[in-house]
C-alpha cells in the first residue's frame, strides 16, 4: 500500500513583542523613573511631566492638547475649561475640579487624558540629537488623573513607530506640507481619510490638519501614511536654490517629493487593497 504524506502547513507568522532598547528611549527618563522624580522633562519634541517617577501629562507642539481634544468632542465647553483652570490651576487640581463640578465624568476624563498623553509622548520621545533637560519640583496644573509608568509610555511609543512603518516606511509626509499626487482616490480612501485629504492643499502639514479636525496627531499620521501608501498624497519640500540665485532675492519654488517606490512594499500594498476590496 502506498502512503501519501501531506506536508504540514507553514507556520503562521508571529508578531514579535516590541522591546524597549537597553537604557530606554531616553536614558534620562529611565533614570528619573528609577529615582521617582517629580518635575518636567524637556526635549526637542515637547515635555513630559513626571510625578513620583510616573508620567502624568505630556505636551508637544505637534499635537492638540487635552483641552482641544475635549472641546472638539463636545465633552466640555470652552468656558467650563477656562473656569476650571482659573479656579483650580493654582492648586494643581484642574482635573479634580472638572469631575467634582460635574463637567465631565471620571472615566471620560481618564480616557481623553491617556489619549492626549500617549499622543504627545510619541513626539516627545522621537529621535533627537539635542540634550534633554529636567526641572525638578514642577507639578502640572492638571493634577493627578491617571499616572502611567515610564516603561508603558516607551512601549506604546515604539508600537506606534512600528505601526507607521508597516503602513508606509517613508516618514517624509509626517512633517512636511502635503500635496495631492493627482492619482484618483478610488475605494481605497475611507471617509475618515477623506476628511484628511480634503484639507491637503500644499500648505497644511499633518499637524495642521489634526488641529483643524480636533483629532490626535498620531491618528492623523496613520491616515496620512495610508494615503501616501495608496499614492494619493506625498510630501512637498523646498527645492534648493540654484547657485546663481542665492542671495539675489529670487524666490525658490517648492517641489513635490517623489513617492517612495520600493517595489516590494508597493506590491504588498496593492495586495492588501485587493483583499480589502473583496
Image (cartoon, rainbow, N blue to C red):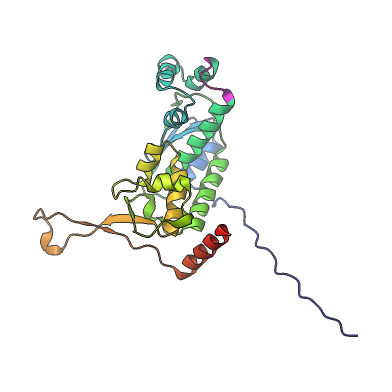
Instruction: Say if residue 272 shows up in the picture.
Output: yes
Please tell me which residue lies in front, 242 or 6. Answer: 6
123 on left or right of 252 = right
209 on left or right of 95 = left
Q: Relative to 155, say whether 68 is above or below.
A: above
For the stretch drawn in magenta, the main secondary structure is loop
Q: Quadrant of residue 68?
A: top left
137 on left or right of 105 = left
Where's residue 79, x and y in %? 40, 18
Where's residue 34, x and y in %? 55, 38
105 on left or right of 234 = right
Q: Quadrant for the N terminus, please.
A: bottom right
Residue drawn at x 49%, y 26% as measured from the top left: 75
Outermost residue to the left:
248
Residue drawn at x 62%, y 57% as measured from the top left: 15
Q: Quadrant of residue 87?
A: top left
Residue drawn at x 53%, y 22% as measured from the top left: 104
Where's residue 138, x and y in %? 43, 26
Q: Quadrant of residue 246?
A: bottom left
Where's residue 185, x and y in %? 42, 56
Residue drawn at x 70%, y 66% as measured from the top left: 11
Instruction: Say if residue 55 shows up in the picture.
Output: no
Q: Quadrant for the C terminus, please.
A: bottom right
Please tell me which residue lies in front, 175 or 57. Answer: 175
- The span shown in magenta is 101-106
248 inside magenta stretch:
no
Outermost residue to the bottom:
1
Please tell me which residue lies in front, 142 or 228. Answer: 228
Numbered label tally: 0
Q: Relative to 252, say whether 102 is above or below.
A: above
Amino acid at each position: 500500500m502506498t502512503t501519501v504524506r501531506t506536508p504540514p502547513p507553514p507556520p503562521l507568522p508571529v508578531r514579535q513583542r516590541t522591546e524597549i532598547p537597553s537604557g530606554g528611549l531616553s536614558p534620562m527618563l529611565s533614570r528619573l523613573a528609577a529615582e521617582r522624580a517629580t518635575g518636567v522633562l524637556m526635549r526637542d519634541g515637547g515635555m513630559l511631566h513626571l510625578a513620583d517617577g510616573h508620567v502624568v501629562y505630556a505636551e508637544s507642539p505637534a499635537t492638540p492638547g487635552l483641552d482641544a481634544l475635549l472641546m472638539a468632542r463636545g465633552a466640555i465647553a470652552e468656558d467650563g475649561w477656562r473656569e476650571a483652570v482659573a479656579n483650580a490651576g493654582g492648586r494643581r487640581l484642574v482635573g479634580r475640579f472638572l469631575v467634582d463640578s460635574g463637567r465631565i465624568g471620571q472615566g471620560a476624563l481618564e480616557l481623553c487624558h491617556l489619549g492626549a498623553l500617549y499622543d504627545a509622548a510619541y513626539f516627545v520621545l522621537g529621535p533627537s540629537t539635542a540634550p534633554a533637560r529636567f526641572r525638578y519640583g514642577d507639578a502640572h496644573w492638571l493634577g493627578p488623573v491617571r499616572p502611567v509608568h515610564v516603561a508603558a509610555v516607551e512601549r506604546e511609543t515604539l508600537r506606534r513607530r512600528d505601526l507607521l512603518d508597516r503602513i508606509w516606511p517613508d516618514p517624509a509626509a509626517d512633517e512636511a506640507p502635503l500635496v495631492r499626487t493627482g492619482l484618483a482616490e478610488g475605494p481605497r480612501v475611507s471617509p475618515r481619510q477623506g476628511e484628511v485629504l480634503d484639507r491637503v492643499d500644499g500648505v497644511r502639514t499633518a499637524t495642521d490638519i489634526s488641529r483643524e479636525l480636533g483629532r490626535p496627531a498620531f491618528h492623523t499620521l496613520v491616515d496620512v501614511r495610508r494615503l501616501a501608501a495608496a499614492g494619493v498624497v506625498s510630501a512637498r519640500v523646498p527645492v534648493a536654490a540654484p547657485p546663481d540665485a542665492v542671495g539675489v532675492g529670487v524666490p525658490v519654488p517648492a517641489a513635490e517629493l517623489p513617492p517612495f517606490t520600493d517595489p516590494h512594499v508597493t506590491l504588498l500594498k496593492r495586495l492588501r487593497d485587493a483583499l480589502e476590496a473583496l
